[in-house]
Image: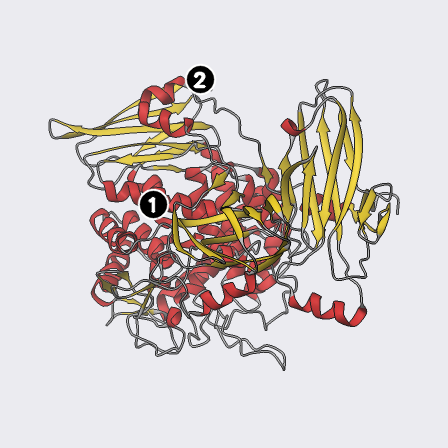
Amino acid sequence: MTNYFTDIHWIGHIKTNDNERYTLGKTFTLDALPKTAVIRLDSHGICAVYVNGAFVDASSGRYANRITCVEVTSRLKQGENEIRLIVGGFFYQGKERESYERRGLHFSAAALELSLTLADGRTQTVKTDESWHCESDEGDGNAIGFSLVTVAEYTRFWQSAALWHEQKPLAVPSAIMDAVGDDYAAYIKTPVPTHAYPPTILEKTERSITYDFGRLYVGYPTLMYEAERDGVVTLCFDYAETTDDFGGESEYHLASEDLNLTEPIHAGKHTLLIHNRRASRFVKVMFDGAVKNVSFAYRLLMMPYSKLGWFSSSDALFNKMWEVGKYTLHVNKQREYESCPRNEMKYFSGDGIIAALIDYYTFGDAPLVDASLSLTEMACNSGLCRDVYERNLGLWDYPAWRIITAYNHYRYSGDVAFVKRYYEELKQNVEWMIHKMNGRCLMYQYPVYLPPFHKDCEAVEWTCSADRLGEKPSLNALFYKSLLCLGEWGQLVGDADAAEYTALAEQVKESFNRYLWDDERQAYVETVDRSYIPQDGNALAILFGLADETRARAVLQTLKDTCWSPYGSTILSKETGHPMHTRGGAAAISPLSCTYEAESRFLVGDDEGALDLMKRVWGSMLKMGAETFWEFCHNEEKRWPIPSHAWSAGCTYLLSAYVLGVRPLTAGYERLLFAPQGDVAWVKGVVPTAKGLVAVNGEAANGQQHYTLTVPQGIAVETRLPSGATVQIVEYTV
């Protein structure tokens, strides 16, 4: 068993009173400052880490193996240093509080590693063990050791965790600066804020203040106050994104009540930093006594980033779309790609796929995909199939989305080691789908049931509606694409099954077009209910190459005739009568699915239709006051009561990949496709690639469009230009 465990201990203290918090500490000496220093932290219960008295970050402890990984190089000093962990408290986990009443004690624990790289290349580590000092209101002593982190856990979760880099000046090649000008220089030099302060007070009384931050923020609540006596403060957070929605009665507003916090305050002037991370635009602060000189802020914890990607054009609406989409990803970009702040630290593979595509063009943070896919819990969300024989698994499309997300990562990064690391796991995903195939070489979606004493399950696919059953175009398009991905990856890793996956994909394609195509409707339909046109399956059929050019154009015309409205393209061509509005068919618009439809239009050369759809979907949200894009939209002039959602920001990806026109042709940008599309007078921008930054500058002169494409040396470029356009390719040395 020598090589089974690491020497990182889970340590903590058993509390027998209702004050859950205690402190773990360790001092250590550095002879010289390290070149880099990184802390990795996991916890049961909330755990805040301080280095030399300064707050660094906190782990929510909500899900196992969500590793907090943060650089602390600048926090260390030569000589004696100290790490302190403030442990305890649970992230709206009511069951844990109930169990405390029964067992009469609180359990919480933390595991930490500080990894130092010294100037001479040597490494040094500080790890949690039973020598750490514990300070508690029940007395001081050494920490209790609970268990050891295994090598397997360390390799999978700790080493692949998303690293929060300390901000450093960006080294942008002069050729890139020359290509796009001063606006980009100003953009990358603008400092990243550390705090957000509310510009507006909506309401103020003697005992309460309601703040409006103007947009959604994610971070640690920080309260500055002066109190006459000891007491408590209650903080209420609201997911609403406009004043019209604030304090409403939607299920999302009511759910935010679970996030309310009550904390002790003390007489005198103090600053209260709360380690429970929160996300909101509106915050109401209520006191049980007289206070004065109150101010509130968020200490921001939104994944720090290098502002590498950039987009600007002659169309101000497109520029606003790109920026709001980037910010939408930013606030959903914590330890891993999240669906939205209310689902903090979950990973949904069907959501993460579009988040990753946006990231490749805005922040260039490709390792975050690895961190997301390393998570193995909550199989229905992550899309990870542990057992090919499992039939009663919700979200049947998510195993395919996991495969395609991984494939996209390889396409953008060229990381062969990543392929080898995840191949066997994703192969089991595709085998799970094959086990669901019927005699017509198609997957037949049937209901998903949960065990007794659980609520009815709606989650059979991404619309979360059990009403859509049968041989669905969306599910089978994903099945087909997954087989192609595994076929290509299998060849890369030398798997003998690779050819079988590719051959089976061709059989699925033949069946897809034979059984799901409807000549009368000129679209693909679902076999249980053929009375409506599904937007998702038809868009994916084009996107993944199942539809030939004739059928692709017919499908796009059918979608325009049956699904389009002033606010976008609806999920289905008819209303379903489903009691949940997000599943209402023609009553609801999905920005996610509209991303796939708009991309399909770009791919068949319908630039006008793609841009028109984008203006309807994202333009309508902006018109209604969106500062982050929403999970779904009403098919009418009405705000949606659901807040920020990363899968809804696909316009940012589309603008960089298609209007700016930079996409990888082969893995890792060994070959780059430059294919700008869309009628804009001028466009310029920067795309981070695996080979270095790529810049585009295009403008019309004398009735002709001319582009300058600036690329690192060594990238092979293929161009597909609009009729009459010209391009000059400039190479620079990285």
Q: Find out whether the residues at labels 2 and 1 contact each other: C-beta distance under 8 Å.
A: no
Horizontal arrangement in the rendering, residue 264 relative to residue 590 (left or right): right
Q: In the image, what residue type sits under mark 1?
A: Leu
**Is disc 2 placed on a helix, strand or loop?**
loop
Marks 2, 1: nearer the viewer: 1
Horizontal arrangement in the rendering, residue 314 relative to residue 105 (left or right): left
Q: In the image, what residue type sits under mark 2?
A: Thr
Up-down relation of residue 30 to residue 437 (above or below)? above
- Identify which residue, 393 or 78, lies in the foreground: 78
- Residue 149 place in picture, x, y as percent: 78, 48
User: Which quadrant would residue 123 be assigned to in this image?
Assistant: top right
- Residue 156 place in picture, x, y as percent: 68, 46
Circle 2 sits on which residue? 733
Circle nearer the N terminus (2, 1): 1
Circle 1 sits on which residue? 654
User: Which quadrant would residue 132 be assigned to in this image?
Assistant: top right
- Identify which residue, 323 or 235, lies in the foreground: 235
